[in-house]
Amino acid sequence: MKRVAMILLFAACALNWSFASGTGEPGATGEPKVVTWWKFTEGNQLEPYHERRIAEYEKLHPGTKIKLEMVPWENYLDKLLVAASSKTGPDIYYRSNDYFQTFIEKGFAMDLYPKWVDDSMLAKLEPSVRASITRGKKVFGFPSEMEPIVVFYRKDLMDKAGLAYPKVDWTWQDLRDYARKLTITEGGDIKQYGIGLPTDPGSYTTFIFYPTLWSAGGDLVNNEFKKSLLDQSAAASALQFWSDLINKDKVAPPKMMGNMGSAQALANGQIAMFPCGPWALNEIANNYSDMSFGIVPVPRGPGKQQTVYGGWFSIVNPYGKYAKEGADFFKWYFGDPKRSTDRASFEGVLTPWVNELKTQSFVSEYSDLVKRSPLTLEKMIEIRDGLTSKAGMLRAEPAYAVEMVEALSDAIQDSLFAGVAAQDAMNKAAKRIDDYLSKTTIKYPPGNF
Amino acid sequence: MKSAVRNETILGYTLLAPALIGLGVFVIVPMIWAFAISFFQWDLLNPPRFINIGNYLELVRDEQFLRSLKQSLVFSLEVIPLLFISSLFLALVLNQRFVRGRPVFRFLYFSPAVVSMVIVSIVWRFILDPSFGFANYLLHWFQIPRQPWLSSVRQALPVIGLVTVWKSVGYYMIIFLAGLQTIPAEYYEAARIDGVSAVQNFRYITFPLLRTTNIFVLVITTIESLRTFTQIYVMTQGGPARSTFVIALDIYRNAFVFQKMGYAASMAVVLFFIILLLSIVERKYVKEGY
Amino acid sequence: MSEAQLKWGRTGTRVGFQLLTYLLLSLCAVIFIFPFLWMLSGSLKPAGQIMRFPPVILPELSTLSFNSYARLFQAVPFARWLLNSAIVSISWVCGALLVNSMAGYALSRLRFRGRDMVLMIFIMTLMIPFQIVMIPAFIITNWLRWVDTYLALIIPWIPNAFSIYFLRQYFLTIPRELEEAAILDGLNKMQIFYRIITPLAIPAIVTIGIMTFMWAWDDFLWALIVTRSKELWVVQLGIANFFGQYMNAWDVVMAGATIAALPTYLLFLLLQRYYVQGVALSGMKS
């Protein structure tokens, strides 16, 4: 009796709920074209803004619908690849430089030149942004943002230690001195670290490492992408600098608590300085609005003063059913300086159209939403100008293959945690990269921008 | 006589049918597929390319793979005995009649199993933070020196092992508890009259009669520990310096980070045979219960 | 020693032993429940405070707020997601108990050719990592047109080798005499199954029920790749929604995780009484 009941219940449920599914597939002609757009989640809800824009676009283009699907950040790549492997991927999606090159090489990014991104649009962009989306004559993504790394610091903690705020042209030695003076020990315990560095394996750590590497005069590969330059002494000294901060001077914690890109540790006074990008301004405004802090460019080294900026690209999937319609939407959204900047302000990132809008007056269209963001155009200009006061200070995150980034990541790990000497670790990484480069042909070389 | 056997065969397969079909479609076919794809090169985005045993040849020369394998085995060697002993022990203690409030204790010990592994890993990552985590705070209070925990190449893997045991103990505890219910109370009665000690009780009554459960727990903990992925991914991502880079992470990395699906599949095949071998050995070793 | 002293000594030892047991149990209990309490307290604090040092376990009453819970239900359709999880998990459990116990019985009590081979194959299905299986499984699901439906969330993993194996082991411990007596009474194998075996295996069935519910409820990766529409999300996806690239909404995450943990807790509490010794063999007398 009980068995029978269970069988019936199960069958009924299965039948019933198999029809109560999610939205179905759009049909043949006459029905709207549904462009699927995949974006990853942020800690704060940003969808309302995008939904408004989508509604605006749909009114202008009846017959096209944009379906925004949010995917949890941690598994965004997995889901993207699984879907792509069975050709059910989205029409348009986001990706940063970590896999941009891979996707270009594997044919997962559509060439947008000249129909969607033309010469006039390219001319309005930041030079390094332009370089990062083009490969020769082709353009593989729309630029959506620039997130240059700067150093955040706690003004009140500096005051307490009797230190003057760092100057724009400070050096890495200055940074070390600041870190030493800002590390407070109490009863054998370190209560406050001078600076917080990311130390997990992966591309975020290498991303934050690039400014140190570059300003020491080092680089990952030469301009022709034929040989790795990590085995040179400049690179080793950069790595040694990080390793000393953590292991010798102990002014940086071996592991950051929580998310490596979050300003939480800074806000809690666990660290006094923090290399981070402008996305932190959003977090600070929302969660730590009474924190007293300042921003200063990354220090200069014997080589130069250069910081990295990361960014995400809006890419069109050439296998997508409505790829062209998706590209049209992206062009309308990301290809328009004002609209793109409005969104960037809301998301808390720098717009790639800073040059274009600098001299114009700019008022946000969705001021009720945008008001929450502290990253106004003025602030963006302030950050950007503070960084490019010297030529060549802003360099885009390079489009390296994953194998290359991993080699560097392993070198950092070995040096920080496995007690391997910096030079040895870098030599090993250089060899791995050389091996990789000799075995691989790059179809669309990015060039060293 | 023959038709009786045939009836039983028909009944057997009828009862097995849903399970066979379900597992067949969603697990066995994928397994065969995975085995097949290990002879190809597939980057997920373009059609696969046949390369014969190329993946396996590369596997043998892959230093990282051998390291990952070694670390997986070390991890399992720590987790399996700890998990088995502690969950059995707790089940035994909680089965004692004199213990009041058994349901409460059972409930508390089962708690970690209930929360998702991702959240558990995040919470422990916070607690074990070397600079500001609660674990070191506690140690400091007892005048014990602070430990690096997850930022040490020597401590990270054992620590994650302990977290794994912590999470799963309640789980296997209730499996043992269920198993303990099958032992008739009369046996214990008889033993008590004979004046048998608690240890002898365990050795001659409880443990032998738990044989089927023991085998089950042993085999399953072996399989699960060699497949460990989530907690390591969340807590250390295979670091520091690849000291916690176990085989499941290597498979994931090759499949999704490098888009070398064929190669990852070959790793999975090797892992499969290792687990298979271990399970067979375990069951033969504990002999009966098959 | 006099008899009185001996007696006293033994009682003293027994009390001491019991005290020690309780102490040990309580200490363990603290270790086990502590992270859950931390999670709970994290959900009641504002997001910025969760990583404070020295760690604050019991939040001050002034900062205590259910804000995170409110945000959880207002900012996203969390209630709908809870419902989805409930639908999926309950269907899954019903199906699983049925299918897996049938298979377990067949593999333990019936004799037929290929029986041991089938068991071996079932156990082998546990040995392959999910990341490899999920791509072909997804392709199959896509081909069946089940993507973005409840079917894809419920059906594929209903037959489960862990459950089958466990139930089979348990069925093996039920004495054959009971079966033989039943055969003499004229019952056929199917009737033996649901009249005799099943009631005796209640502890095992309850255990598998709880575990299956847990797996269904906690499932994340599969739900992630077969779901497209937000209306179909399950609770675990919903919580992951609050993780971001650079920052996580910790308070909301903890709130979500606390709520997500409750159903399994409740289920376990309710079903605890099936772990009473002797229930299994009460049928022996008849």
Image (cartoon, rainbow, N blue to C red):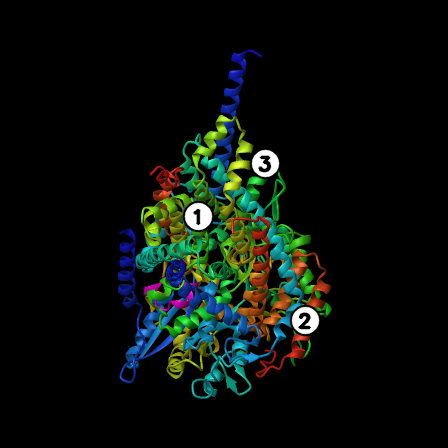
Amino acid type, mark 3: Phe
* Labels 2 and 1 positioned on one and the same chain: no
Circle 1 chain: C
Give the residues drawn in magenta, as a range: C222-233
Task: State whether discs 3 and 1 lie on one chain.
Answer: no
Q: Are marks 2 and 3 on the same chain?
A: no
- Marker disc for residue A432: 2
Question: Which of the two marks, 2 or 3, is nearer to us in this view?
Answer: 2
Quadrant the N terminus of chain B occupies: bottom left
List the residue tagged with mark 3: B142
In percent of width and height, residue C16 lies at 52, 25
Q: Residue A39 at what x, y percent from top left? A: 42, 70
Label 3: how many residues lie within 10 Å, few (<14), some (14-19) or many (20+)? few
Residue extending farthest to the top is C2
User: Residue beneath label 1, please?
Assistant: C170
Query: Which residue is located at x 45 percent, y 43 percent?
Result: B179
- In this rendered view, identify the residue nearer to me: B242 or A147: B242
Q: x and y percent of residue C106 in the render?
A: 41, 56
User: In screen coordinates, is B39 left or right of B2?
Assistant: right
